[in-house]
DNA sequence: CAAAATGATGAATTGTCTTCATTAAGATTG
DNA sequence: CAATCTTAATGAAGACAATTCATCATTTTG
């Protein structure tokens, strides 16, 4: 009748439902396009709201991303302790932590990219909920190392934090090409290699003993047994 | 006199000079504000050109950043081999590589941030000149390891690339807080610690075992088995 | 010194995040 | 069951930054 634009039918949903809708839409759009290349208009459309509505529930685009990643992270960590509790032995537990990280990267490269590139690099990262979750996540690794030290298996003169940095740094460095969309990697194999390297280091072990010494040979056999016993519980 | 906007005096410089001016301006603005928060208008102003002029010499904002980082990277690598040639021994040379990396991060955190966050994560990174320079840069590390292996100092059963990932991954992971503007680190100390950890690994060395008799060593191995069995029942 | 070449301009375009006054669905009340 | 209230949702407008391009001005060339 008049020149006024027709307003489409307005559906009023509960706050919880709207937030869930927007976050689901945001996750899928972010996953497809990354952060910069994901226009809020796409998210709004997929969530069946108008752009402005997003600002009723989220401070800004970045806040939306933070909430999305936080949500994803929480669901990931949910069954973590349970899985870990079924694994025995320092080496196996350490390997699990590395493997779990690699597996996550392998399964959700896009969300990991967002986490690594956009979230973790922000000035406000340590005020973020994700920061706290991440601390929880890596705390387990520190605990495992500590247990290993207490059990006399690991050196007691290393910085725990440095070991953690080595594990996660190596793991992530190893997956960058994949995260850029170049090539692939096998989480199982890579986890084995990293765990082995972290534990043993580069330096050659007593070359004069190798293969000849009786005790060394028996110890190696026991090491294999240990690994076998641990693997069964995983 | 008329309402036409007065055009300021136009200075025509050589292409080389203009490009240099713009890149210098861009480097300083990027260093101060990062990538997203650096408006092209700031760069243009500091370079004494108008925004549009930048597009005569650079494809777009990202291209400008790539060129800026490339330029910086090249100047850094210039005296690299000379420095390295003065250092002998696998451990020292490896430590130098780690230290150099840490030192760079310590001195130019802002530019490193741009490199790590913006450049290296882009889809086009492996087509970038910086990618090639970076390969050159880390190639030395691989060579050092290889030399160590050939000299019989290092294990010959490790993946070179994995070792490289471990070194650089650990180094960078260690410096993230600093790169976010939180806290500080000492390049010398950190380099020592990382070199030591990479070389020796986590596993405990048992110098005391070397002279111990066979029976004792077997007993210790069995003790470990017993502990393992105990863990599973507990 | 006229003509050609090209460095440089700045206005216009485009795309996106963000704000906000207004509208109306649904709950509450008498 | 109408009047009123609350607040979810809208959509237009603002702000800002990257990018394009027709035009202008300076320098070089013949």
Image: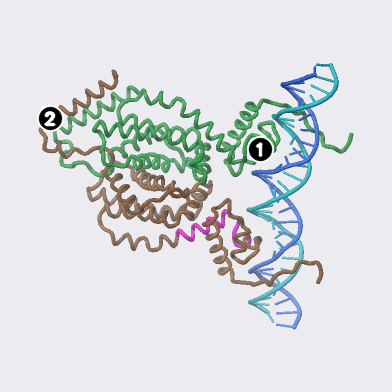
Chain colours: A green, B brown, C blue, D cyan
- Dot 2: element: helix
Return the x and y of residue B155 as percentages of the image width and height. 26, 43
Pick the residue in front: A68 or A36.
A68
Return the x and y of residue A23 as percentages of the image width and height. 60, 32
Is residue B184 visible in this depiction of the protein?
yes
- Image quadrant holding the C terminus of chain A, namely top left
Pick the residue in front: D30 or A112.
A112
- Dot 1: element: helix
Residues at badges 2 and 1 in contact (C-beta under 8 Å)? Answer: no
**Relative horizontal placement of residue D4, taking residue B127 as reference (left or right):** right
Is residue A105 visible in this depiction of the protein?
no
Return the x and y of residue A44 as percentages of the image width and height. 67, 35
Give the CA separation, mark 2 to mark 1.
70 Å
Q: Residue B74 carries which label?
A: none
Q: Residue at x 13, y 32 (%)?
A: A214
Q: Name the residue under label 2.
A: B216
Residue A17 belongs to magenta span = no
Q: Which residue is drawn at 25% across and 49% down?
A: B150
Residue B66 belongs to magenta span = yes
Span colored in magenta: B55-73
Q: How crowded is mark 2: few (under 14 residues within 10 Å), some or many (20 or more)?
A: few
Q: Mark 1 points at which residue?
A: A55
Q: Chief secondary structure of the magenta span?
A: helix
Chain at tag 2: B
Q: Marks 2 and 1: same chain?
A: no
Task: Name above or below for residue C7 compared with residue A55.
Answer: below
- Image quadrant holding the N terminus of chain A, namely top right
Chain at tag 1: A
Task: Name above or below for residue A86 compared with residue B142.
Answer: above
């Amino acid at each position: 009748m008049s020149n006024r634009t027709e307003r489409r039918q307005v559906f009023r949903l509960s706050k919880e439902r709207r937030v869930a809708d927007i976050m689901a839409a945001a996750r899928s759009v972010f996953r497809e396009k990354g952060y910069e290349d994901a226009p809020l208009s796409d998210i709004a459309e997929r969530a069946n709201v108008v752009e402005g509505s997003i600002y009723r529930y989220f401070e800004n685009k970045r806040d939306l991303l933070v909430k999305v990643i936080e949500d994803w992270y929480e669901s990931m960590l949910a069954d973590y302790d349970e899985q870990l509790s079924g694994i025995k032995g320092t080496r196996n537990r350490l390997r699990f932590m590395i493997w779990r990280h690699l597996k996550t990267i392998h399964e959700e490269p896009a969300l990991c990219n967002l986490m690594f590139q956009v979230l973790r690099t922000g000035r406000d990262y340590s005020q973020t909920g994700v920061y706290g979750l991440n601390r929880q996540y890596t705390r387990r690794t520190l605990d495992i190392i500590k247990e290993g030290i207490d059990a006399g298996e690991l050196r007691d003169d290393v910085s725990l934090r440095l070991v953690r940095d080595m594990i996660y740094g190596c793991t992530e460095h190893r997956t960058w090409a994949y995260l850029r969309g170049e090539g692939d990697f096998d989480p199982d194999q890579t986890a084995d290699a990293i765990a082995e390297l972290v534990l043993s280091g580069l330096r050659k072990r007593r070359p004069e003993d190798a293969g000849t010494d009786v005790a060394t040979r028996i110890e190696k056999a026991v090491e294999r047994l240990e690994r076998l016993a641990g693997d069964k519980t995983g």
